[in-house]
Structures are given as C-alpha cells and as structure tokens.
Image (cartoon, rainbow, N blue to C red):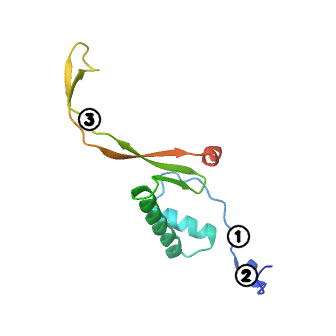
C-alpha cells in the first residue's frame, strides 16, 4: 500500500506557487520552474521534454498524425495539397489581377487547445 519507508512522502518538497512571468519564459527558466514544482532534477525535466519531442516526432511523422498532449492540447498534422500558379484579384488594389505562385504539397501542424487548457486561462 505505500512505501515501507515513511520518509518518502516527507522527502517530497512542497511546491511553491507558480507566478506569472513578466516576459515569456526561456526553455531553461521553464525547466527550472518545473524542477522546483516537481522535486525532479533539472536534467530529469530536460530528459522528459526530450522524450516528449521524440514521441511527438514519431506520432506526427510516421504515426497517426494526431497527438493529445496531457489533456491540454491536441496537435494534428494536416496535409495541404499542391496549388498551381493562378491569377487572382489583388485584395489591396481592386480591379487589378496578381499572380499567386505555385506551392508544393506540404504538412501543416494545427494545435487546438482542449477544455482543461481553456479553463486555466
């Protein structure tokens, strides 16, 4: 039922309240904040993110093309077909036509916030 060593529960540090950053956090600042919250070493947090990147690459590259990130967001690969060069109306100069360049087929990532993430904001 729990660990036989009663010190395990007491050894976990009490997480500090996470405060909003005044400017966007760098990767290192994010790792440090998560390490302080979880009691993991910063290197362990970095290895978790590395592993997550590998899982994303596998699932989005050769896998199903959809990844649910911990109930916070859903990342989806959408295949955009190739387009031919075409003449279209110029939206900035009415009556004038402009040439739109041909584009090759490509993969585009779509990231959708899920209910849990929306509730946090």
Q: Are marks 2 and 1 in contact (CB under 8 Å)?
A: no
* Label 2 or label 1, whichever comes before in sequence order: 2
Residue 77 placement (x, y as % from top left): 42, 48
Q: Return the mark for residue 83.
A: 3
Residue at 60% in and 69% down: 36
Out of 2 and 33, give the one closest to the viewer.
Answer: 2
Location of residue 58 with respect to 106 vertically, above or below: below
Residue tagged 2: 8
Mark 2, secondary structure of its residue: helix
Q: In terms of image quadrants, where is residue 34?
A: bottom right
Secondary structure under the numbered disc 1 in the rendered image = loop
Q: Nearer the viewer, mark 2 or mark 1?
A: 2
Q: CA distance from mark 1 to mark 3?
A: 55 Å
Instruction: Give the spatial CA distance, label 2 vs label 1.
Output: 13 Å
Reading the chain from its start, which is encountered first: label 2 or label 3?
2
Q: Report the residue marked by disc 1.
A: 14
Does residue 9 sit above or below 108 in this rendering?
A: below
């Amino acid at each position: 039922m729990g660990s036989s060593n009663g010190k395990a529960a007491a050894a976990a540090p009490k997480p500090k309240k996470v405060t909003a950053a005044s400017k966007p956090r760098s990767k290192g600042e994010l790792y440090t904040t998560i390490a302080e919250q979880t009691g993991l070493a910063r290197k362990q947090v970095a290895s978790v993110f590395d592993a997550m990147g590998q899982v994303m690459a596998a699932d989005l590259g050769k896998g199903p093309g959809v990844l649910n990130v911990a109930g916070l967001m859903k990342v989806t690969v959408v295949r955009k077909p190739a387009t031919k060069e075409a003449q279209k109306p110029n939206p900035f100069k009415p009556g004038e036509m402009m040439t739109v360049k041909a584009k090759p087929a490509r993969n585009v990532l779509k990231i959708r916030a899920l209910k849990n993430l929306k509730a946090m904001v």
